[in-house]
Image (cartoon, rainbow, N blue to C red):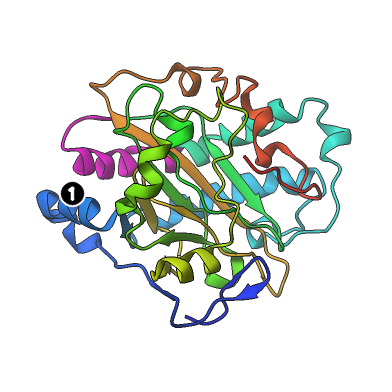
Amino acid sequence: MNGCRIKGRAVSSTLIIEMTDSAALMNDPPALRSRLQDDGYLFLKGVLPRAAVLAARREVFERLVQVGEVRAPAEAGIATGGSRRAEEATDLGGFWKSVSEGAGLRALSHGGAMTRIMDTIFGEAPRPQDYMFLRAAVPGRATGLHFDYPFFTRAHDRVVTVWTPIGAVPVSDGPLVVVENSHRYRDLIDPMIGFDIAKDSTRKADFGSDAISFAEQRGTRLLTQNFDAGDIALFGMYTAHGSLDNCSPVGRVRLSCDVRWQPQSLPIDERYFGDDPRGTTGVGYGELNGAKPLTQEWHVR
């Protein structure tokens, strides 16, 4: 795959390959679950209604047009390079909560199509967290390598992250990247057991090394896709992942959301559920990078 960059470095075509499309296994749930267990992730192409994806995209970007961060037409998602968000939204967390709870976005992220997919994944009734990690990444932004375990396993580890591109996200725009077979890295996973990012301020979830160097040292590969509207990727708490750099040549904002799902029968981590979920650190949506104006740098946890 060409055009992939991480922390400004070009990724060799021998180090990065396309994720395997498992959408054909949706009609064979045992095989689908086996694939998830074996590979540590699933890429499901075209499983969500394209119209719902594009409606959610338009809804979110229209809010960013209103605060001067995205140019009209909203659905193109082209950054202006400026922002009036801090001036027009006195409560940045409240603003991002309202964007994250838009009716069109929630119909996509928590609606019937997604629920049916997750019912198939778990083999029982699923339940999504109400708290959403919505990300609008301008060119130059990326997410470092990490496991999700330190954030979401306070109650149990039968939690699955669903990463949804809200519109097309080619490799030039910084999509999700997964480390092949990282769910088998016991030397990293075993010392992580019991690590709660909100309770231990002496550690970070971020690996601190770029994905290229990490993959080279491990003798493994990175997995990604040229994602289209309707695609999703999902993985468990022990799969290392991050993103490519957004290097969009036209200044396009990469829009995506993460929602965590679990079996309905299991206990919940109350931080992520309810009408006013408090999130990982207890301050609600204000803790998220998404709550920051697009002109501000992201923090690293």
Q: Magenta stretch mostly in which secondary structure?
A: helix
Horizontal side, residue 50 vs residue 158: left or right: right
Q: Amino acid at mark 1?
A: Arg
- On the rendered image, what quadrant is the C terminus found in? top right
In this rendering, the answer to whether 84 lies above or below 69 is above
How far across and how far down the image is residue 261, in percent? 35, 35
At a point 37% along the width and 49% down the height, the residue shown is: 187
How far across and how far down the image is residue 192, in percent? 42, 37
**Residue picked out by circle 1:** 33
Can residue 110 be seen by looking at this rendering? no
Horizontal side, residue 123 vs residue 112: left or right: left
In this rendering, the answer to whether 227 lies above or below 281 is below
Between 199 and 94, the residue placed more toward the observer is 199
The question of residue 224 being in magenta is answered with no
At a point 43% along the width and 31% down the height, the residue shown is: 152
How far across and how far down the image is residue 229, in percent? 45, 60
At a point 50% along the width and 20% down the height, the residue shown is: 271
**Boundaries of the magenta span:** 107-126
Between 256 and 108, the residue placed more toward the observer is 256
In this rendering, the answer to whether 243 lies above or below 275 is below
How far across and how far down the image is residue 104, in percent? 51, 40
Instruction: Quadrant for residue 127, please give it.
Output: top left
Can residue 99 be seen by looking at this rendering? yes
